[in-house]
Image: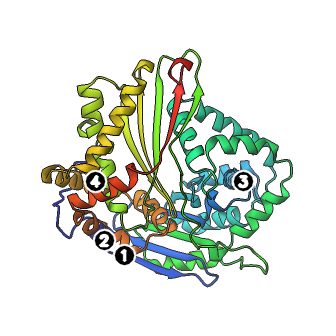
Amino acid sequence: MNPLPSFAVGSSSGLADTLSSVEQDTLSNGIRLVFKHMAGAPRLAFGVYVMGGNRIEPNPGVADIISDLLMEGTETRDAETISILLDSLSLSLETDTRRDYALLNGTTLAEDMDEGLELVSDMLFKTSMADFEKEKVRLAGELMMELDAPATQAYDLMLDRLLRDTPYQSSLANILKHVPSYDDVAPVRQHYQNVFNPNNILITVVGDCQPGPIKAALEKHLVSRSPEPGQNYIDTQAPNNPCLSADVTVTDEKPGSSQLHVFKGWFAPSLSHSDYPTATLIHNILGGKGLTSRLFLELRDKQGLAYHVRSQYEASRFIGVFGLYIGTEPSNRNKVLDGFRQECAKLAETPVPADELADAKTNLLGKKLVYLETAAQQCVYLGAQLSMGMTLDQIRTLNEQVNAVSAEDVQRVAKAIFESPAVTALVGPASAL
């Protein structure tokens, strides 16, 4: 790993410098373009972000199926032809679906950019969906494999209950429940045609290339499709604020397990909320800093209650989820839940010492700079943040926002999160549930 970049709390360096040369534009058919020149980058990184993701799918898993089908053939190329072409172009591509967007991203050599973008355009707008049945089976198998891990199962169980009746209710288990029943490709195709339209697409490009040639290549290959009458566009109006009226505990028995997996989760600030920087620092202090975080020091080092313990903060466009996880002996059930309660209460009731808060800021922003060292990382970071509602100004000023957080802010936001109702998910032997 490269050494940590120098970073001084309170300075104007950091993300503002890293992202200072970002440019924005719009193609003639409505596709938004975000470009950053990165001198010396060996490959050109690009990302195609289709707004909405799981949040707007008509049924759980539809967006995931579409993402998988993009790589499986177009109207003019089958999956084998695509694979051969990718190898010949030294073009790497992958697809994914997130809560707020679907993603096709990759890297290529500058000399292969033109032909590579022609293939990307074909995959985006002319997928054949010929392997619909096969992708259903593959997706179900991947979900079952993910849920076979007890920690993942506990997290998904918590999310499934916490996000119920919100636009973000597509948990892994919920998708797995619905996908096998999709017998008709027509509704999937209709959603694809509605959502994969230029007015709903953001493209990010980072590399050692000027914006002129990039825009010209994109105009050449990605303007062939224009929005059609009657297409459904994304409603960007925020949904009703989710709420939980009381604490809830959900369980799933894991016969023969020698471990209890616990995930406790609360609603938290969304990505574009003014309290997002404070919530990220709470995550860093409580469990995101690894060996020196409060949960690790108290529950693992001092009390010996944990095999593994951490916090988790996932902020989406309209919602955020703050979670605490621990893997422990089943007999420790009540002790670890009480430990969670005590550590959360400390943050809400007692000001964080100045040195601990300063260390959390340095750690958080230093990690961010390390993460943004490569063109591919910057490309993905820009696309994800912008797709989830942040502006370039918000991204560039994250340093200032984090450095401005006070101990009083930490108390206020911790109180708002941890004194609200929570969902506790328990996965383990019946004796501990």
Residue 243, horizontal then vertical, whole percent: 54, 56
Q: Is residue 430 left or right of residue 394?
A: right
Q: Is residue 60 visible to us here?
A: yes
Q: Which residue is mark 3?
A: 62
Q: Which residue is mark 4?
A: 364
Label placed on residue 393: 1
For the residues labelled 1 and 2, say whether their Cβ atoms are less than 8 Å apart: yes
The amino acid sitting under disc 2 is Thr
Q: Which mark is residue 397?
A: 2
Q: Earlier in the sequence, mark 4 or mark 1?
A: 4
Q: CA distance from mark 4 to mark 1?
A: 19 Å
Find the distance from the CA under tag 4 to the CA under tag 3.
35 Å
Whole-angstrom CA distance, mark 2 to mark 3, is 36 Å
Closer to the camera in the image, 299 or 52: 299
- Does residue 221 appear to the left or right of 370 in the view shown? right
Q: Residue furthest top?
A: 256
Q: Amino acid at mark 1?
A: Asp
Give the number of callouts.
Answer: 4
Point out residue 240 in the picture as x, y percentages from the top left corner: 58, 66
